[in-house]
Image (spheres, rainbow, N blue to C red):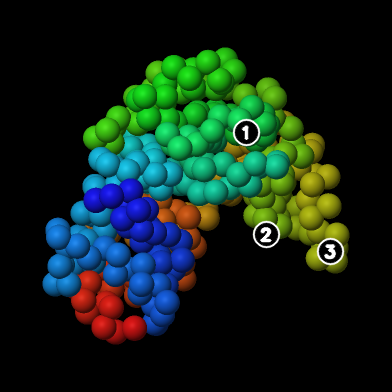
Amino acid sequence: MCPSDLRSLAGAFSPAVFKALAKAQIGSAAGRVARLLGPDVQASTVLADAFEVAHARLLSTYPNEYAFKNEIISKIIVGKHSPSTASALIEQPMGSSVADVLILNGTSTVYEVKTDLDSFARLPAQLADYSRHAEYVYVVVSERRVEPADRAVPGNVGVIALRRRGSLSVLRPAVSNLANIAHADLFRLLRTGEAKSLIFRLTGHASRVASGRARAEMYEIFTTLPLEQAHAATVAELRGRGLSARTLITNSVFPPSLRALAYGSELSAIGTARLQQRLLLPVGAVLSAI
């Protein structure tokens, strides 16, 4: 396939398509789903299998950002840890930057992806932001960019290489940033409901102030917690966001190629069930039912 065809194929792996497949009608996302069709994927191919074939092609010939993210999820959460004890947030805002993958498994680790098409120009600012919010930070690059990445990142940041067949090799381990994390930065990662849950779990305090002031009240209490406790409690709350993803990726019929999309999209129970059913249908049947 030519580069333009590969870019078009990569468009099928988008949050918009994933969420559309969980709706009653997939609507305009059908055009991107149709991009899965080709010499190796016929209309009779089951949708889950079609995604697997497409992802394998992208990984071997056009390792875009999504291919990197999905391998990180697969190798770290499924391969190294477990979906029952670890979770992930995709595209998580941190300061003025957005972390590609944040994995939560008792601690917090950011994985910043730099494909062969990405510049390192913004990397110093990004890494500074991540180091104030997560205990460990890694930059993930292809094998050909290992040396430039090693020169570009500070000593506390780790470097990982994505091999052509999808394996991840840690070339430099990350060093803990826990001493550099501030309560204010941790607290900004939490939604107000999560902050209330955290404070009640640790202190027994239930907010009785007006909702507009509740967050400020929670923050005042949060700052009194020892940093290690505040960090661990924040990780525990953030890990709770991955419930729909955990349901999906632990299902034997769910394609591994969609794991990063599962963690990047919060679905309802109905949407999760609908998506699982659609993935078992032939691509042609999915497209004809729009």
Give the residue number, with chain letter if any, for mark 1.
122
In-image side of 14 versus 202 (left or right): left
What amino acid is found at the position of numbered circle 1 in the picture? Arg
Q: Where is residue 174 in the image (x, y as percent from the top left)?
A: 51, 21
| Nearer to us in this view, 207 or 27 | 27
Return the mark for residue 212.
3
The residue mark sitting in front, 1 or 2, is 1
Amino acid at circle 3: Gly
Left or right, residue 56 beside residue 32:
left
* 176 is higher (above) or lower (below) than 112: above
Q: Residue at x 27, y 42 (%)?
A: 61
How far is the residue under mark 3 from the one under mark 2? 12 Å
Residue 222, visible in the rendered structure: yes
Tag 2, which secondary structure?
Answer: helix
Dot 3 falls on a residue whose secondary structure is helix
Residue 234: x %, y % from top left:
62, 43
| Residue 134 position within the rendered picture, expressed as x and y whole percent measured from the top left | 60, 33
Pointer 3 local density, CA inside 10 Å: few below 14, some 14–19, many at least 20: few
The answer to whether mark 1 and mark 2 are in CB contact below 8 A is: no
Which residue corresponds to mark 2?
193
- Name the disc covering residue 12, or none: none
Disc 2 marks which amino acid? Gly
Among the two numbered marks 1 and 2 on one chain, the one whose residue lies closer to the N terminus: 1
Q: In the image, what residue occupies the spot 49% across and 62% down? A: 266
Residue 178 drawn above or below residue 260: above
The residue sitting at 25% across, 54% down in the picture is 54
- Residue 210 percent location from the top left of the image: 85, 66
Label 3 to label 1, Cα distance in Å?
35 Å
Q: What element carries label 1?
A: loop
**Above or below, comparing residue 243 to residue 236 in the picture:** below
